Amino acid sequence: MLDVDKMDTQVIEPLVDLPQLRTEAFRRVNEETYLIGTRSKSTGQVAYPGIRFAYGNCREDCEASMIGPRGTLYSFTRLGPLKDHPTPTVLGYVDFSGDVRVFARIRGVCKYSELRCDLPVMLNSDDSDWWVEPITGD
Amino acid sequence: MSDAYIVGAAMTRFGKYETSSYSAIGMPVVRSALQRANVEIDDVNAVFCGNLFGGSLTGQRIVRDLGMGGIPIFNVEDACSSSGVALHLAVAAVRAQKLDVAIVVGVEKLSKFGGGPIPMTEEDYEAQRGVVMPAVYAMRAQRFLFERKVNKETLAKVTVKSRHCAVENPYAQFRKETTIEEVMASRTIADPLTLFQCCPTGDGAACLVIMSEKKMRASNVRAVRIKASIVHSGQPTTGFRDMTKPEITARSSSDAYAEAGISPKDLDIVELHDAFTIAELIYYEALGLCEEGGSIAFLESGQSTFGGQVVVNPSGGLLSRGHPVGATGAAQAAEIYWQLTNQAGNRQVAGAKLALSHVTGGGIGRLDHGACTVHIYEAAT
């Protein structure tokens, strides 16, 4: 028989995430760019964009975590030109330490043919956006 | 528990139908499938409709103009896996003896977007940063070429095979042979994938009639038994994922083989999700059709087409038959129904007894794919 006195009747509020998705979470420190993701205290899971609840145990223990500035280009492509993408865009997946993968725009590429999988890349940014660039001279 | 059978199928040719609504595309195939299965409208216990962009109450709009209503009508959306999942739900209901007769209809009209990649979900982070499905598969291909140390022309061979099969398929959107040179010369969509290495945008519908064993035995129908019906969703991760090893397909097919009690080597036909050329190569391995690392040799040796170990995509697959996304799962099952009942005409795979269909639904970040549906079918004696 249900014990109505012990029923959890707390009204649940949705998370507010849509403005945050459109606000790129990154920071410049000493001319280096870092992404601001999250790290779970209980599982160690690192995520970008950040997450509120850790995967698997749902604990609300994710705290801000700086990611970067160096990563490894797992794969990439040049998209377009297409009808809705008239300017070709170079995109890729970048793996950072802490086992976090980020979908990124790639800039600073002199020749597209110089890109390769497993290329070292570095985060960079301006006032409004971040991207990755190939590391030259390593 | 009852077995579930496909006892009738119909589909449109996949193409561009700008002057047809969703219900105008879907209703004729429902009517035709019912007639072919000798089923009256009043005999149908439920409708399962798969589509992605049809809007509100698509299933109801399709069957309304046949005077069908009152019964449960379920609208299913799982991206490109929508009608595959609709089939799974119909099969589950029939097996549980909740229904004797169900309609599964898949329908889509992508021409309304005017061409180009299909829209992604705006709320997803990667979509906001510019991802589209060709880019996802292009990155998969880039990594595959890097690890296997092969050139881009290898991918083009998949399209050549696909077009060759589609020549004999009257339902296919593209039915003309092509060459590696033509495929490579088509414009680049997302490097290394060229236009001919990407499934076309198009419109179309496919419908299946599903029956319980009791009803099937009392009817004068040609039947195909569904031996396995599996749906999985992708495992989310914020970290590393091997894009050349599609885990959702491997899990789903493994469970399907276990449910059916067969191994990949027993299959005569596979209709797999070749939305892009790279997909066919990695799915050969994930479905266990060849050993890990063996997909290129499997293709180049002819083992995946007529005369080989298994005929993969005798319909021409998504690359050539087309991919109106919500319709694809049902279309794969329709092709297999015709193949296993010896109704596939000039593209008939001789003596086919066992087949598998595989359709995935992708398009959000942190997952291999959002959904994967695998069915295994057996010719019923």
Image (spheres, coloured by chain):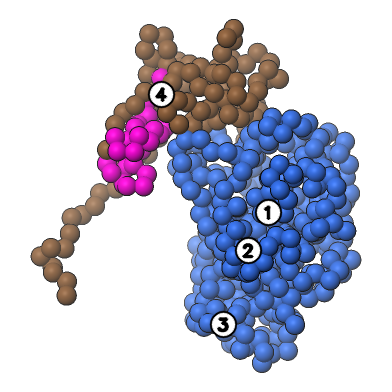
Chain colours: A brown, B blue
As measured in the structure, the alpha-carbon distance from the residue carrying label 2 to the one carrying label 3 is 19 Å
Work out how far the residue at label 1 is from the one at label 4, CA to CA, in angstroms. Answer: 38 Å
Q: Amino acid at mark 4?
A: Ile
Q: Is residue B377 left or right of residue B127?
A: right
Q: Are marks 2 and 1 in contact (CB under 8 Å)?
A: yes
Q: List the residue tagged with mark 1.
A: B288
The answer for which chain carries disc 3 is B
- The region drawn magenta spans A34-60
User: Splitting the image into 4 quarters, where does residue B59 fall?
Assistant: bottom right
Q: How many marks?
A: 4
Let me know if residue B184 appears in the view.
yes
Amino acid at pointer 1:
Gly
Label 4 to label 3: alpha-carbon separation: 54 Å
Residue A108: % across, % down = 58, 15
Q: Are marks 2 and 1 on the same chain?
A: yes
- Locate the C terminus of chain B and report the quarter of the image it occupies: bottom right
Which is more toward the observer, A17 or B229?
B229
